[in-house]
Every structure is written in C-alpha cells, then in structure tokens.
C-alpha cells in the first residue's frame, strides 16, 4: 500500500506552487493579520490551528526569503517533478514540508519556545535531496562559480545546517526545519519509493 504508485503525469505543478506562494506573499502585504493566521505558531496550534502545519510553507518573511526559496524550487523542483510525476511530487512536497513543521513543533513544545515558523525551506530542502538522488552526477554551480556534484552540495548544506544549529551562529533561521525536511525526504525515498539515497549518491 505504501508503495502503490500513481499513474504518471507531468503537469508542471511546480509553477502552480510558486504562483500560490507569490499570491500569498502579496496578500501578506495587504492583510497584515494573514501571517499570524498562516504561519506555524505553537501556541496557536495547541488551540486547534492545525492547518498551520501546511500553510506555514506558503508564507514568507520578506522578498529575499521568498525569492531564494522559489528560485530553488524552480531550479530543482522542475527536474524532480519530471522524474517523479506531478502527483508523486505533490505528495512528496507536502508530506516532507508538513512533517518538517510537525517535528519543529515538537521541538518548540518541549523547549517551551513559541516562534513563528514560516517559509517553504523544509520542503525545498527535501526537493534538493530528491534532485541529488535522481541526478547524482549533475553539477551545481555554487554562487555561479564553484561546481559541485549535487550529492556533495546537499550533504554540504546539511552539514552546515547541523553546524549552525549546534553553534547557534545564525539565529532566526529554522535550521531544525531544514534538517527535518532532509530527514523526512530521506525516509520517504526508503519507505515510499524503495530507493536508498546513499546508494544513489554513490551510483549504485
């Protein structure tokens, strides 16, 4: 049941997701209370606002936040959707993003903190992982200069996220959510798709 596949279709849903994100971002600047309603805020989730586990992925803090998230989704998500098919991609995107939010909520709950979690970064981190799994020999140019194999890029970013989470050098960034997106994406490949990402990275 867990591995029952969808009939393949490719409908460019990445562009729809980007479009929704842009519309929500524009609406945030018109309706000031919208961010509070859609961001994942632990104290509000405890009051029953459970939709925030999904909606937090569609709200962003500022222009640079949404720009770089949507750029990453456009660059990597298009290839991943083409490989997975649109239905599988949508399931992957929302499962990884929502579970990254739930894991973050659990951490905030036990540490008695109440931040506002917002942004698509957790799901996009999972999309970047998927790109590296499907295209392990592709080269990604960091800052347009440094060429790295996709798996090296993803594992390097993951190591940086762990470092920043431990040292707290970049506060205000949801490192745990990024790492959770990576971890859930890894498990999704193992459980749902029957693919071991590590073997794919090594070309096996």
Image (tube, rainbow, N blue to C red):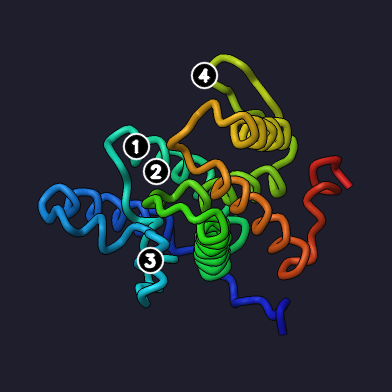
Query: Dot 3 surroundings within 10 Å: few (below 14), some, or many (20 or more)?
Result: many
Residue carrying label 1: 67
Looking at this view, is 22 or 119 the one in front? 119
Residue carrying label 3: 52
In the displayed structure, does residue 12 sit left or right of residue 204?
Answer: left
Q: Residue furthest bottom?
A: 1
Q: CA distance from mark 4 to mark 1?
A: 17 Å
Marks 3, 2: nearer the viewer: 3
N-terminal of the two: label 4 or label 2? 2
N-terminal of the two: label 4 or label 3? 3
Name the spot of residue 202 as percent of width and height, x first. Answer: 85, 40
* Quarter assignment of residue 140: top right
Q: CA distance from mark 3 to mark 2?
A: 20 Å
Residue carrying label 4: 144
Q: CA distance from mark 2 to mark 1?
A: 5 Å
Cβ–Cβ below 8 Å for labels 4 and 1? no
N-terminal of the two: label 4 or label 1? 1
Residue carrying label 2: 70
Q: CA distance from mark 3 to mark 1?
A: 21 Å
């Amino acid at each position: 049941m867990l591995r029952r596949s969808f009939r393949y279709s490719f409908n460019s849903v990445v562009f729809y997701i980007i479009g929704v994100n842009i519309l929500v971002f524009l609406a945030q600047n018109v309706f000031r209370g919208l961010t509070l309603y859609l961001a994942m805020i632990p104290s509000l989730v405890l009051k029953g606002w459970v939709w925030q586990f999904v909606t937090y992925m569609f709200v962003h803090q500022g222009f640079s936040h949404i720009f770089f998230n949507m750029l990453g989704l456009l660059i990597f998500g298009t290839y991943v959707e083409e490989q997975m098919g649109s239905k599988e991609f949508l399931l992957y995107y929302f499962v990884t993003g929502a579970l990254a939010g739930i894991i973050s909520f659990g951490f905030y709950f036990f540490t008695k903190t109440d931040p506002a979690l917002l942004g698509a970064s957790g799901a996009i981190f999972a999309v970047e992982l998927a790109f590296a799994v499907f295209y392990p020999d592709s080269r990604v140019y960091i800052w347009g200069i440094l060429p790295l194999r996709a798996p090296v890029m993803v594992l390097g970013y993951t190591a940086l996220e762990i470092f920043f989470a431990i040292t707290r050098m970049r506060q205000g960034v949801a490192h745990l959510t990024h790492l959770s997106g990576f971890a859930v994406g890894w498990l999704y490949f193992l459980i749902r798709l029957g693919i071991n990402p590590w073997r794919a990275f090594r070309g096996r």
